[in-house]
Image (tube, helix red, strand yellow):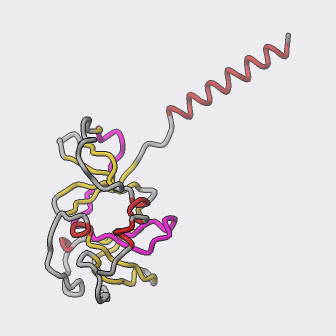
Amino acid sequence: MANKEALRELQQRLAERLQTVREHAPARNWLAVEVAGHGFLFPLEQAGEIFPLSATQSVPHSHPWFLGVANLRGQLNGVVDLAVFLGLAQRPARNLAETVGRDAGRLVAFNASLQTNAALLVDRLLGLRNASMLKPVVGDAQIAKPHFVGQHMTDEQGRPWYELDLAALAADEAFLKIDV
């Protein structure tokens, strides 16, 4: 009899712990950026360090979206103009050594866990977002988009946001093929 009662108490404690874990599960968090006027969300666990725009060494015979290689904290990283890569903007070739100022853009490196030495050029950093601040857009499945572009969401002001899966981007064949 005592064993049955102890078993019920154990089950009750486990049920309470599971409920507590569900209620306090970590919410999804993103780094919000602007690229050619569009809002993108980088999962925080996939985004790495943020750097000011720095000089790059150009790479001959590469796509226009590949700006070159930059030394970011002693590590060489390929720099990709995300707007041009996604086809959102056609920009003239940029000399990043001459581009300065707060509005010049930022480089967002990939998290080291993705094992990709690359950084994405974004126009502006817009802070952090979490799941409670955004709601999914329903009926968005018909829109053709690359496999690394995830959920389409909106915030309280109605601004559209697209989640960008950096792990999927880092494995994308077109992203990895920088030569023309």
Measuring 28% from the left and 71% from the top, which residue is drawn there? 121
Q: Position of residue 44 (x, y in %)?
A: 41, 56
| Quarter location, residue 3 | top right
The residue range painted magenta reads 109-135
Residue 86 lies within the magenta run: no
Relative to 7, 12 lies left or right: left
Q: Position of residue 120 (x, y in %)?
A: 32, 70
Q: How many numbered circles does the render carry?
A: 0
Measuring 45% from the left and 82% from the top, which residue is drawn there? 75
Relative to 15, 112 lies left or right: left
Measuring 23% from the left and 83% from the top, which residue is drawn there? 96
In this view, 26 is above or below 34: above
Q: Position of residue 117 (x, y in %)?
A: 44, 75
Q: Name the one closer to the observer, 133 or 137.
A: 137
Q: Name the one closer to the observer, 114 or 105.
A: 114
Quadrant including the N terminus? top right
Quadrant including the C terminus? bottom left
| Quarter location, residue 13 | top right
Measuring 39% from the left and 49% from the top, which residue is drawn there? 29
